[in-house]
Amino acid sequence: MNKAVEENLIKTLHLDILPAAKQAKVLEDIGAILYQRILMRVLENMDDATKGEFDALLGSDPKEDAVQKFLESKVPKFGDLVLDEIGKFKEQALSVVAKAAQ
């Protein structure tokens, strides 16, 4: 996750009240959740040939930037998809927090 996204999540979800170590752990967990959500959405829209290429890439234990470059080149409007998933996650997280505060 890039620094701007992390800072936005910290501010939006009020994670700034946590100690730095806990913030890092929460952001790591959020990153894993977002990664899974984005992958699921991407896979739903990939044709079989592209899924095969992607599977081969993942099988080579790629670095994160290689996966991102692949997705950016093969998934139309990948950046918009990522922003959409981050927005949905924030909405859901804020809803859970609001319900817990009642």
Image: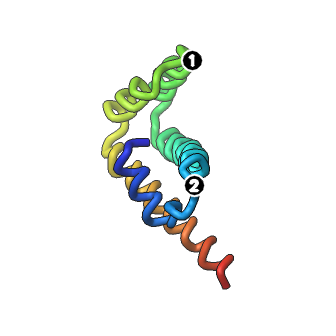
SS at badge 2: loop
Between 65 and 73, the residue placed more toward the observer is: 65
Name the residue beneath numbered marker 2.
19
Q: Is residue 35 visible?
A: yes
Q: Nearer the viewer, mark 1 or mark 2?
A: 2
Furthest toward the top, the residue is 60
Q: Residues within 10 Å of mark 1 (few under 14, many from 20)?
A: few
Query: What residue is drawn where x is 54% and y is 17%?
Result: 61
Left or right: 98 in relation to 10: right
Between 30 and 54, the residue placed more toward the observer is: 30
Q: Is residue 89 above or below residue 26?
A: below
**Quadrant including the C terminus:** bottom right
Quadrant of res 77: top left
> How many numbered dots are placed on residues in this image?
2
Q: Is residue 40 visible?
A: no
Left or right: 49 in relation to 22: left
Q: Residues within 10 Å of mark 2 (few under 14, many from 20)?
A: few
Q: Earlier in the sequence, mark 1 or mark 2?
A: 2
**Quadrant including the N terminus:** top left
**How far apart in space, not on screen, are marks 1 and 2 (Cα)?**
37 Å
* x, y percent for residue 19: 57, 54
Q: Is residue 42 above or below residue 58?
A: below
Name the residue beneath numbered marker 1.
59
Of the residues shown, which amino acid type is indicated by label 1? Gly
Of the residues shown, which amino acid type is indicated by label 2? Pro
Q: Is residue 46 above or below residue 67?
A: below
SS at badge 1: helix
Left or right: 60 in relation to 81: right
Furthest toward the bottom, the residue is 102
* x, y percent for residue 70: 38, 27
Query: What residue is drawn where x is 40% and y is 54%?
Result: 7
* x, y percent for residue 28: 56, 43
